[in-house]
Image (cartoon, grey):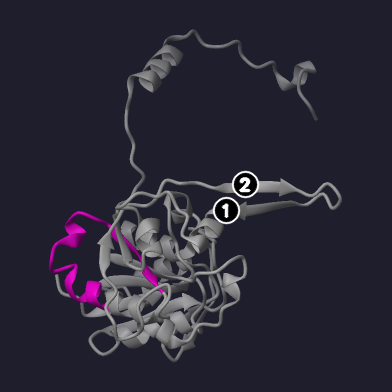
Amino acid sequence: MSVDRILLTNDDGIETVGFRALYDALTPAYDVVAVAPAADQSAVGRSISQDVVVHDHDLGYAVEGTPADCVVAGLGELVPNADAVVSGCNKGANLGEYVLGRSGTVSAAVEAAFFEVPAIATSMYVPGGDDWWELEPDPEHFAHAAAVTRYLVDHAIDAGVFDHADYLNVNAPMADGESGPLPGERAAIAVTEPSTLYEMDAEWDADTGDITLHDRIWDRMRTGDVPDPEGTDRRAIVEGRVSVSPLSVPHASEHHEALDGLAEAYSAETDPEPVADAGSGAGGD
């Protein structure tokens, strides 16, 4: 299967620097049609709408909806002949098993997989503390993300990668010479699995009654103190490599004797006592 037309989406919004970086990297070789959120839709997961408003845009279409909305509207109507979906480039990494379901960037790729369209979700790791999100990135910062995404679109389908994976979750270092090589230099690819480390916690402020949710892993990544083993996405990105995780949908399901036994026991039980008739006074209004 050759790639001619690409549906490009994201969750940060169609006007962001990372989105334009991928658009500019792909358009010299492909017919790229943007179908992306009109505004920031970060961390919405696979939230879906019933109706969305679509606006014409210089790059394609701006959708007043979520990344999943964009993929469904795009593959279902706006760009039904797309050969691949690319989502990104997200400002901020999407690493670890627990992040995959909440990331709008990754969720767009998951939605495409249900259409049986090869998809790549690309994110850029921004080092720093709790204020990393305040960074106003330059286009050059996305150099490694753009280069590896273009490389994978060029080669992965013909190489048979998507015979074994439904989508690729790509995380690239920022091209700043510190967290990753400078633009023009090559950042090596590591084929990875999502990390299983989970360090979310909550802190209750008794004075205000507020509970603050905090992901402690970002503090550890800032200092390089991550216990993730070799072969995991987080280890690769901390070491300045591009993490590429080949992933599949739907969620895996495994039958086992414990649950099968419960199901059989429930089915074998006699019917429970019928619920009292509402008119007997046992029910409510």
Q: Callout 1: 10 Å neighbours few (<14), some, many (20+)?
A: few
Q: Quadrant of the C terminus?
A: top right
The amino acid on which the numbered mark 2 sits, given as a three-letter code, is Asp
Residue 247 x %, y %: 30, 54
Q: Nearer the viewer, residue 161 or 71?
A: 161
Can residue 117 be seen by looking at this rendering? Answer: no
Which numbered circle lies on residue 11? none
Residue marked by disc 2 = 201
Question: Could you say which quadrant of the image residue 85 lies in?
Answer: bottom left
Check if mark 2's residue and mark 1's residue have beta carbons within 8 Å.
yes
Residue 140 x %, y %: 41, 86
Q: Nearer the viewer, residue 129 or 246?
A: 129
Question: Could you say which quadrant of the image residue 280 lies in?
Answer: top right
Q: Nearer the viewer, residue 35 or 103?
A: 103
Which numbered circle lies on residue 216? 1
Question: Could you say which quadrant of the image residue 175 lies in?
Answer: bottom left
Task: Write down the region rendered in magenta.
Answer: 150-173
Q: Nearer the viewer, residue 96 or 83?
A: 96
The amino acid on which the numbered mark 1 sits, given as a three-letter code, is Arg
Residue 136, above or below 215: below
Residue 25, above or below 155: below
- Seen at 40% across and 68% down, the residue is 71
In the image, is residue 101 part of the stretch drawn in magenta?
no
**Among the two numbered marks 2 and 1 on one chain, the one whose residue lies closer to the N terminus:** 2
Spatial CA span between label 2 and label 1: 7 Å
Residue 246 x %, y %: 28, 57
Q: How many marks?
A: 2
Is 69 situated left or right of 183 in this image?
right
- Seen at 46% across and 53% down, the residue is 101
Kind of element beneath mark 1:
loop
